[in-house]
Amino acid sequence: SSSIGREEVKGVEEVKGGEDLAFSSLESTSSFDNVPTLAFPSISTADFQFDLEKASDIIVEKVLEFVTKLGNARFVLVDLSSGSKILSLVRAKAGEKNIDSGKFLTFVGDITRLYSGGRLRCNVVANAANWRLKPGGGGVNAAIFSAAGPSLETATMERAGSLAPGKAVVVPLPSTSPLFCREGVTHVIHVLGPNMNPKRPNFLNKDYKKGCEVLREAYSALFEGFASILK
Ligand code: AR6
């Protein structure tokens, strides 16, 4: 809805981070802050080298499935740069499918600074994790573990010691974590996507039949994890 200053692109809204847009007006739309919102990165499409066209199809398919299942919850696909190819592919495909633009948005910004840097409240954040569920390794995993502080690693290890491809684990964030106090994130959901990078474990060696299966499974596990928090 243009009344709250967001840009509509074929039914899907792209909201840019930073302070230069009229996005702060969202704060004053009363019910908005309380809408359960999952922010998620595009799983597997950077370090794990998954094909962007195939990944964008799967993201749109899975969001479509869960947007209807989850009632008033919102889904936000996040990437760092406004030139993000995955964001534009997903926006175009979501527009074609007429996904409710109030329930699915794309957002340009750092997923660890959605509220402080972009005035976007997301109570749940997904992480494109590694199988050891350990900090570091670059990408969004390194950013989330670093922004959340050491308590995320402790809380994660209490829930799971490792993760198989296609699986997700929901981790309640201790209220002392900066990601909780500063950004309002109450849960991190770690997801392990399919890996097409020969230098990483569980390499699928161009097997996109298996790869697509595992990516679908990963998004289902992620969105079901989000649903379990809402209950
Ligand atoms: N905020 C928002 N999006 C981000 C951020 C951020 N701070 N950082 C990266 N992205 P990747 P993968 C986007 O490589 O392909 C790690 O080493 C990025 O542009 O983080 O699943 C883990 O330890 C891309 O669109 O995840 C694993 O070993 C998306 O997040 C491995 O990488 C995912 O990119 C997982 O690789």
Image (cartoon, rainbow, N blue to C red):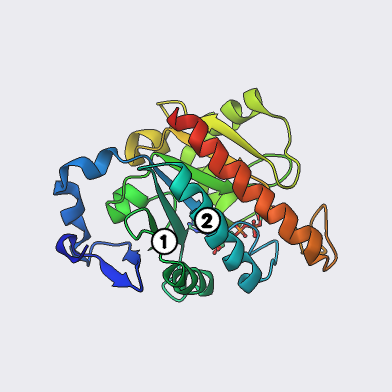
Observer-nearest of 139 and 27 = 27
* Label 2 Cα neighbours within 10 Å, binned few <14 / some 14-19 / many ≥20: many
Q: Quadrant of the N terminus?
A: bottom left
Q: Residue at x 85, y 65 (%)?
A: 205
Q: Residue at x 30, y 49 (%)?
A: 116
Farthest residue to the right: give it.
205
190 with respect to 81 (left or right): right
Query: Is residue 138 visible to the viewer in this orientation of the structure?
Result: yes
74 with respect to 8 (left or right): right
Q: Label 2: which residue?
A: 41
Question: Hey, what amino acid is under mark 2?
Answer: Pro
Question: Hey, what amino acid is under mark 1?
Answer: Ile
Residue 35 lies, with reference to residue 113, above or below; the image says above
Quadrant containing ligand 1: bottom right
- Asked which secondary structure carries label 2, the reply is strand
Observer-nearest of 140 and 85 = 85
Q: Residue at x 82, y 68 (%)?
A: 206
The answer to whether the beta carbon of the residue marked 2 is less than 8 Å from any atom of ligand 1 is yes
Observer-nearest of 208 and 27 = 208
Q: Quadrant of the C terminus?
A: top left
Pinpoint residue 190: horizontal percent, then vertical percent.
Answer: 60, 41
Pinpoint residue 21: horizontal percent, then vertical percent.
Answer: 22, 66
- Count of all numbered marks drawn on residues in the image: 2
- Asked which secondary structure carries label 1, the reply is loop
151 with respect to 9 (left or right): right
Q: Label 1: which residue?
A: 99
